[in-house]
Image (spheres, rainbow, N blue to C red):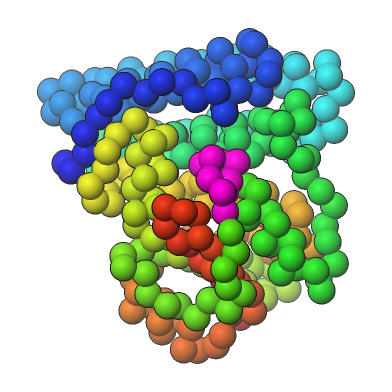
Amino acid sequence: MFREIEEVEWDDRFNIGVGSVDKAHQRLFSIVHKMINYSDNEKKSRWVCEEGIKFLKSYTIQHFEDEEKYMRDAGYSGYAMHKRLHDIFRDKTVPALEKRLVESDYSEEEMEHFLGFCLGWLTGHIMIEDRALTGKIVKRTQGVLPENTAAALENVLIHSVGEVFGLDIELISEQYAKEAFADSLIFRMTYRSDEGRQLAVYFVLEERLVLSTVGKMMGMEFRQVDNMVISAAKQISWMLMDRMNACVTLLQKYKPYEEDVLTKEELDREFQTGRPYYSLLFDTGIGYFAFCIKQG
């Protein structure tokens, strides 16, 4: 393993301003981080993961119920959507992840995937969804017209990525043409419409950006990309897409279908078959990332 673990202090950026909810979030982060601390200990890692999953499931059930009660009492307009995200995580996502762990006999690869997913989901959910409960971020907006899609994508990405990672984001090009970063992590998310049309979304993330931001989330110094890093980055990318789906009319016509991690060569071949409809390049100050949409 090429990572060093350090003690993580709670970042006040994650506070939404509701004491009971903030304490629960701190507890959830603590659970996941303790599991990560033991993930390199071969003798303890499986037991800790098994017990951690049990505790995580029971604790999230109670936390989700408390958070949903707060939303109902406050008359939060986004309650139905927020509860749906809770239901999916509790009833589908965690059982599916646990099944993968059991079927792999708690392999190192699957434990890293599970831990990265949990921390990525928790970070994205708090920063993108929970902070909207108390107006810490702008609530989901109505879909914009197709001709304004590029501006909407730029706005959502700058604000959402900035909120999640605490970075100042700047758009530097609206014509990203698969210029190679020194090293990059490339996610392709495929969507399909009810009519069978296909939409491919690409996140191209410079490795140093991913290692820095995921490392900060986990209280680790990562020296190379591993399964935990990929899982966390992929999950946050999906949650950013969920945010954009709610804001951009074009994306609302499609539903998630599949996901892939691509090599640079595979990305080259993808772009050779047709130019992306939208292709944006951003600078975060600690690395670049690109966001592209290609209609099939």
Left or right relative to 219: residue 81: right
In percent of the image, x 57 and y 54: which residue is there?
Answer: 169
- Residue 176 included in the magenta stretch of the image: no
**Quadrant (top left/top right/bottom left/bottom right) for the C terminus:** bottom right
Q: Nearer the viewer, residue 76 or 168?
A: 168
The location of residue 42, given as percent across then percent down, is 13, 28
- Residue 166 included in the magenta stretch of the image: yes
The location of residue 183, given as percent across then percent down, is 31, 65
In percent of the image, x 77 and y 31: which residue is there?
Answer: 135
The magenta segment is: 161-169
Left or right relative to 264: residue 244: right
The quadrant holding residue 184 is bottom left
The relative height of residue 235 versus residue 155 in the rendered view (above or below) is above
The location of residue 53, given as percent across then percent down, is 39, 23
The location of residue 267, given as percent across then percent down, is 41, 76
**Quadrant (top left/top right/bottom left/bottom right) for the N terminus:** top left
Q: Nearer the viewer, residue 196 or 70?
A: 70
The relative height of residue 167 versus residue 146 in the rendered view (above or below) is above
Q: Nearer the viewer, residue 69 or 1?
A: 1
The quadrant holding residue 126 is top right
Residue 74 visible in the current orientation: yes
The relative height of residue 79 versus residue 244 in the rendered view (above or below) is above
The relative height of residue 291 versus residue 212 in the rendered view (above or below) is below
Q: In the displayed image of the protein, which residue is found farthest to the left?
A: 43
Q: Nearer the viewer, residue 194 or 164?
A: 164
Residue 190 visible in the current orientation: no
